[in-house]
Image: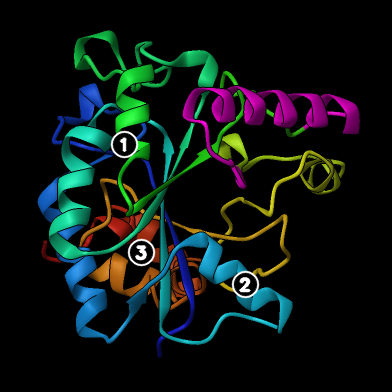
Amino acid sequence: MRPALVLAYHGLGTFPKTLDPHNLMLDPARFRRQVLTLMRRRYGFVTLSELVEHLDRGTPPDGVCALTFDDGTADNVELLAPLLEELEIPATVFACPGLLGADHFAMPAAARVRLMDAGQLRALACSPLVDIGSHTSTHVDLSSATGEEAYEEMASSKRALEDLLQRPVNFFAYPKCGYSPSCPDAARRAGYLAAVTCAGLGGWRRFELTRVSIDSLDRRLSFALKSRGLFAPLRNSPPGKLARALARPLRHHGAD
């Protein structure tokens, strides 16, 4: 089973739970192992642009995977870029142009996780393996946005990134994967080629592309289940619900 995948990550780093309460930061070595696991399963890694090209003809073929990283943390240039170069795989990084150089909004101050500044983002964008997309200007929740509110947020953040990077910005990621019914059309009107959310496998509507979320709790077993589209069905089955009631969540299980 090798379904087409879009994986959603955030940052890379190793933090105790107290400094990463939302499980956003993945150990770089674990990320590398996950990529190698997919390679052993004969996955080919593609850009979002390459994946979206298939939508004109139907759905992406089995065995392709696109990697995405939300928020634009500084570790994307410090840790992610060298790994992409080593593994020779592409990724899309979604940044917030209104938060460049700021402390990460969802991490405790003691974690000292910062978002890329303008220079770091420009440096990352120079990599032939990295495409930069928009994540709104300031990580705005669009789950209740009107069509015009969503359009203005999407269009202004696109312009800001294009002015900074001097290249097209073609993809958008909904913050927290939330969006109102007006958002897909707003993304189209703003000039994006596609927009991504979460919700798992197999959603190929161009402005509601679904991604599989991977976080710091995912070990070998949960990653294997998620990448096959089996994690949510198993977790929500009666045995899965019973297991969660009696013990720790399934996603904690499995060797690294």
Place residue 159 in its image quadrant. Answer: top right
Identify residue type, mark 1: Leu
Residue at 26% across, 85% down: 41
The amino acid beneath tag 2 is Glu
Earlier in the chain: of badge 2 and badge 1, it is 2
Q: Is residue 173 left or right of residue 194?
A: left
Q: Could you tell me how far apart the alpha carbons at marks 2 and 3 are, in whole angstroms?
A: 41 Å
**Residue 228 % position (x, y):** 41, 79
Q: Is residue 85 visible?
A: yes
Quarter of the figure that contains the C terminus: bottom left
Q: Residue furthest front?
A: 166
Instruction: Judge whether 32 appears above or below 174 on screen.
Output: below
Crowding around mark 1 (Cα neighbors within 10 Å: few <14, some 14 to 19, many 20+) is many
Residue 145 is covered by the magenta coloring: yes
Q: Residue at x 30, y 18 (%)?
A: 114
Comparing 26 with 74, the one in front is 74
Mark 3, secondary structure of its residue: helix
Magenta span of residues: 144-172
Tell me the crowding category of disc 3: few under 14, some 14 to 19, or many 20 or more residues within 10 angstroms, Cα based: some
In the drawing, does residue 249 fall left or right of residue 237?
left
Residue identified by numbered label 3: 243
Q: Nearer the viewer, residue 45 or 199?
A: 45
| Residue type marked 3 | Ala
Helix, strand or loop for disc 1? helix
Label of residue 124 in the image? 1
Magenta-colored stretch includes residue 192: no
Q: Is residue 200 left or right of residue 123?
A: right
| Image-quadrant location for residue 102 | top left
In front of the other: label 2 or label 3? 2
Instruction: Report the residue at 79% width, 30% height from top.
Output: 150
> From the viewer's perspective, is residue 2 above or below residue 34?
below
